[in-house]
Image: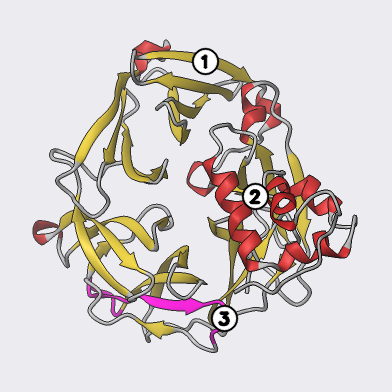
Amino acid sequence: MRSKKKPWSPLLCDKLIEEILSRLPVKPFIQFKCVCKGWNSLMSDPYFIKLHLSKSAAKDDLEHLQLMKNVCLGSIPEIHMESCDVSSLLHSLQIETFLFNFANMPGYHLVGSCNGLHCGVSEIPEGYRVCFWNKATRVISRESSTLSFSPGIGHRTMFGFGYDLSSGKYKVVTIPLTMLSLDVSEKTEMKFYGAGDSSWRNLKGFPVLWTLPKVGGVYLSGTLNWVVIKGKETIHSEIVIISVDLEKETCRSLFLPDDFCFFDTNIGVFRDSLCVWQDSNTHLGLWQMRKFGDDKSWIQLINFSYLYLNIRPYEEKSMILPLCMSNNGDFFMLKFTRNADDEYQTIRYNQRDGKSQVSVVPSSSFRTLLWRNLKIFTKSLDIPY
């Protein structure tokens, strides 16, 4: 039950004002919070934060979406990232560059985004530490306790970041793959950390992985999902999706579409549906799981040849990255061609009639593009603790 407040205006009731303000983008709302104490208090009101996020996520435009990526600055102990509005890619790419300066928190880099919050990870001699922050509001959580590993001679680690719907807590999940000896013997673990927790927790019964996933876990409906090769040896392995329930802190395996190979496989969420795609440098194929959790509900949404986009397979190295999907099913993609000019293009693909609209983006606008590092997110007012 929300506490009763005095009306902010004799002409407008509280409910109507909240409804109007919930439709504003984050940046102007933050500017308007100085109008009165009532508007300012909405910044920390859990009900209003969720209302504002639901309105933003439901929009069928690109104005509320942003891309973010890490930028390597050598040994500079600051988070340095580039971000841009997705809508600006259709016209002229305008990059907003910003620095997060963490006192005594060197080496943090972006590993995940969820509901407008971001998760950063820092590697230290003892292991890893994480923190959460909101780029729009500039609010940062405290550092986590140290994530340590099982004894071994080498480690590889993958992270995922999501939201536990039952507890209202943001959680980070890590999959460390530890080499136990010089032979192929390896140990796979999974550990959880939630905002405000004092320590990391182990997930029991996590399957052995032959290799780690290529990208961090993608969030959907209280779960984190990875494409992995499961098994101790290649002859006994299988390609599956590992889906982790953030409430129960359990995992299960989901099968991929038939005849799906692991090579250059990607996973993402478009319009609240889990999708996987493959870019073979000759074709792009994308499948959608119509009912989440039902691995028999896969359907193919996209299957087009590079020749359709006037790309010469094998003569030029091109990569296509699906970014988002509109309510009417149009896909918005980013294409990078490695050549003398490092050409970038945007593609709006209509899957109903197979037509596409291609626009060229100046290569100087988006320096070195780290494809597996790109995060797309909706700005929000959520609090990272």
Q: Estimate how packed mark 1 is, as few (under 14), some (14 to 19) or many (20 or more) residues with alpha carbons within 10 Å.
A: some
State the residue lying farthest toward the left.
235
Magenta span includes 320: no
Q: Amino acid at mark 3?
A: Pro
Which residue lies under the disc numbered 1? 358
Which residue lies under the disc numbered 2? 379
Res 248 → quadrant: bottom left
Q: Amino acid at mark 2?
A: Lys
Marks 1 and 2 sit apart, C-alpha to C-alpha, by 27 Å
Mark with earlier residue (2, 3): 3
Dominant secondary-structure state across the stretch colored magenta: loop
The magenta segment is: 180-197
Task: Kindly identify the residue that appears in the image at 71 percent across and 53 percent down.
Answer: 18
Which residue lies under the disc numbered 3? 125
Marks 3 and 1 sit apart, C-alpha to C-alpha, by 47 Å
Marks 2 and 3 sit apart, C-alpha to C-alpha, by 34 Å
Position in image of residue 368 (x %, y %): 61, 38
State the residue lying farthest toward the bottom.
198
Q: Estimate how packed mark 2 is, as few (under 14), some (14 to 19) or many (20 or more) residues with alpha carbons within 10 Å.
A: many
Residue 265 in view: no
